[in-house]
Amino acid sequence: MSEAVLMQGNEAAVEGAIAAGMRFFAGYPITPSTEIAEGSAVRLPQVGGKFIQMEDELASIAAVLGASAAGMKAMTATSGPGFSLMQENIGYGAMAEIPCVIVDVQRAGPSTGLATSPAQGDYMQARWGTHGDHPVIALSPSSVRETYTLIIRAFNLAEKYRTPVIFLMDEIVGHMREGVELPKPSDLIINRRKMSFHDGANKQAYYVPEGRYVPAMKPFGQGERYNITGNAHDASGFPTNSHEIAGRLVGRLLDKVERNADDITRVEEYAMDDAETAVVCFGGTARAVMSAVLEARRAGKKVGMFRPVTVWPFPEKQLCRRLPQLKSILMVEHNHGQMLLELRRAVGRDRPVHFLGRIDGTVISPQDILAKLEEMEATDDAE
């Protein structure tokens, strides 16, 4: 029987991470993610794990990468300003292929902005925050229960594809409390780290067989010492100046995500089977969108919700399957139009894409969305 609990989104992130096998957390308190650090400090010692409060966010992500390389499933949590500070080492983790989970509970910005107010302004930063061409997987939950189950998936993807995974929450979900039924431990699917053991002097730590994209990890914490670097490197892990080897390496890092997009991307659709207007949203904004869609349906309008759960890679294929039936699209997000850019790129110029955003730290209501839908109907009819 499932366990019914009253739980906050940030608490669900901790419990889901522990269920996924997280046994190390390093972080620095920052609103609105602080409860994740507080919860990890309490819960990790109870399950044999380690918590450490670092002096800042730069040190936090560095400690997480070190713990993961040594064999522990590791996580950190932050908000916008701290997420900015972590970017260089997120790139290091991508290049060195070190799995970990970075939780970003978004708040209104820029800079220190409105520390306790909701926003979704880190969407583009999650994809392009660090320098260079690099792989990115980012997931965004819309409820407390989904936070629990989706963070388990974040750890599974990090381990499967040997890459940092960004868990892009927002203040709405992080501080929301809901009654939820947590799945039974026996129902959870937990990916174990694929390991490569004891090959003597031939420590090809980044060797990948032909036709594969992800090398097995060596148990660094169990005596299998090898070189780890953010430089372009060969199969042994040592730096190289070979353009051929470097090009092959970075190409493989990108391919392991891009060529497995069908496995990585997930969406939620509601009332989309006969929808002629799609409201696209992600994260906590989906709560208002769902209410607006229900009201529109009661009024006889063919409106549906399309929500990327995997926000990077953007689920272009799933969206494009719906395009032939759609007359118009509305993007709703708590920023100035960040996912809107990806949406317009994917949709092209064949049909109108409208936008409803907010950047003042207040929430978009169902009434705001319904009013926008009415405005769109009048505009599209006039055209």
Image: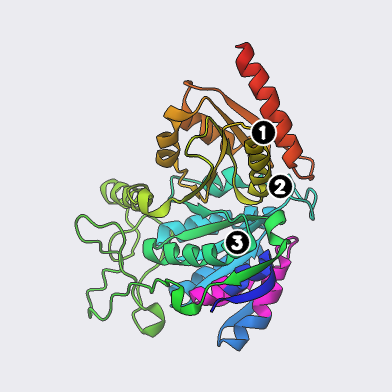
- Asked whether 105 or 184 is in front, the reply is 184
Residue at the extreme left of the image, as rendered: 210
Task: State the CA–CA distance, disc 2 to disc 1.
Answer: 30 Å
Along the viewing direction, whichever of 263 and 182 lies nearer the viewer: 182
**What kind of residue is marked 2?**
Ala
Between the residue at mark 1 and the residue at mark 3, the CA separation in whole angstroms equals 39 Å
Point out the tag, 1 or 3, that comes first from the N-terminus: 3
Nearer to the camera, 21 or 101: 21
Which residue is disc 2 drawn over? Answer: 119
Q: Give the range drawn in magenta.
A: 16-41
Residue type, label 3: Val
| Quadrant in which residue 5 is drawn | bottom right
Query: Does residue 81 appear anywhere in the picture?
Result: no
Mark closer to the chain start, 2 or 1: 2
Disc 2/disc 3 C-alpha distance (Å): 15 Å
Circle 1 SS class: loop
Q: According to the image, label 3 marks what residue?
A: 103
- Find numbered disc 3 in the image and state the secondary structure of the residue it sits on: strand
Which residue is at a point 60% across and 64% down the rendered structure image?
Answer: 145
Colour mapping = rainbow
Which residue is denoted by mark 1 in the rendering? 299
Residue type, numbered disc 1 = Ala
What mark, if any, has residue 370 been given in the picture? none
Residue 287 placement (x, y as % from top left): 67, 49
